[in-house]
Amino acid sequence: MTDHRPFHFKKFSLLHHQSTMKVGTDAMLLGSWVDVSATKQLLDIGTGCGIIALLLAQRSNASIDAVEIDELSAKEANLNFEISPWKDRLKCYHTDVKRFTEIIGKKYDLIITNPPFFTSGFKTKTARRNLARHTDTLDFESLIRIADRLLTEEGRIALVLPYTEGMQFIEIAEKLDFHLSKLMKIIPTFGKDCNRLNMVFTKTKPQNIVKETFTIRNSDGEFTDQYNFQLRDFYLGL
């Protein structure tokens, strides 16, 4: 049975039962990690229920646009935006991001996305879920070219991917003159291998790549102090 109750955070609540991409660890760690201190115009590609956009609205004063190809997800995101404390700075467009690129007519300081990453093989029984999770509609090269068109010259694109796909993205981005500037290796449990990468890319090659490692759980299964500190402004009870 689907749970229709809202997900409550310290400063906002949201619904996510209609969305193909719900509240999850990937979105929480990306949205709480990326630097938004000087960001004025921000774009969230594939917003789902709007969780990343809302995290960044809480952390910044930016004007935030979101794009979502799935109709029910886009409606839910706009509802979540409307009931948030930052409704005047948030808007979700129900459209394909390639079409959005042609019509929007402005540039962004930051693009953020939890993009589709399955390239082949297993697909779910739900067409909407496949649309959100597979690169059939938005491959890595297309995403980088969209970022090139929509970002200011000093702009950044931030995203999270599984480790293998993340390494592939770094290679593709470099060929298209987008350069890794910041990297967080995410380890699910102490002693395990990295399974996710938070990444930031810029058009200008940095002198140094800022690298860090983040561990979610201790070996006993409890959340690490690092995790609790990172999400202290959002989760109730932290």
Image (spheres, rainbow, N blue to C red):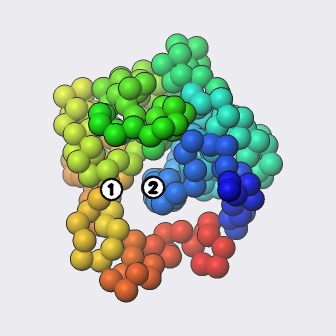
Mark 2, secondary structure of its residue: helix
Farthest residue, direction bottom: 220
Q: How many neighbours does mark 1 have within 10 angstroms: few (below 14), some (14-19), or many (20 or more)? A: many
Count every numbered label the image shows and give the total. 2
Residue at the image position 45 percent from the left and 29 percent from the top? 151
Q: Quadrant of the C terminus?
A: bottom right
Identify residue for label 2: 26
Q: How many neighbours does mark 2 have within 10 angstroms: few (below 14), some (14-19), or many (20 or more)? A: some
Q: Quadrant of residue 75?
A: top right
Q: Quadrant of residue 142?
A: top left
- Amino acid residing under circle 1: Arg
Residue 56 image position (x, y, % from top left): 59, 51
- Amino acid residing under circle 2: Asp
Residue 40 image position (x, y, % from top left): 58, 40
Farthest residue, direction top: 102
Q: Quadrant of residue 159?
A: top left
Residue at the image position 66 percent from the left and 73 percent from the top? 236
Residue 68 image position (x, y, % from top left): 58, 32
Q: Is residue 14 visible?
A: no
- C-alpha distance separating marks 1 and 2: 8 Å
Q: Nearer the viewer, residue 50 or 226?
A: 50
Q: Nearer the viewer, residue 231 or 155?
A: 231
- Against 68, residue 210 (above or below) is below
Identify residue for label 1: 196
Mark 1, secondary structure of its residue: strand
Q: Earlier in the sequence, mark 1 or mark 2?
A: 2
| Residue 149 marker | none
Give left or right: position of 166 versus 91: left
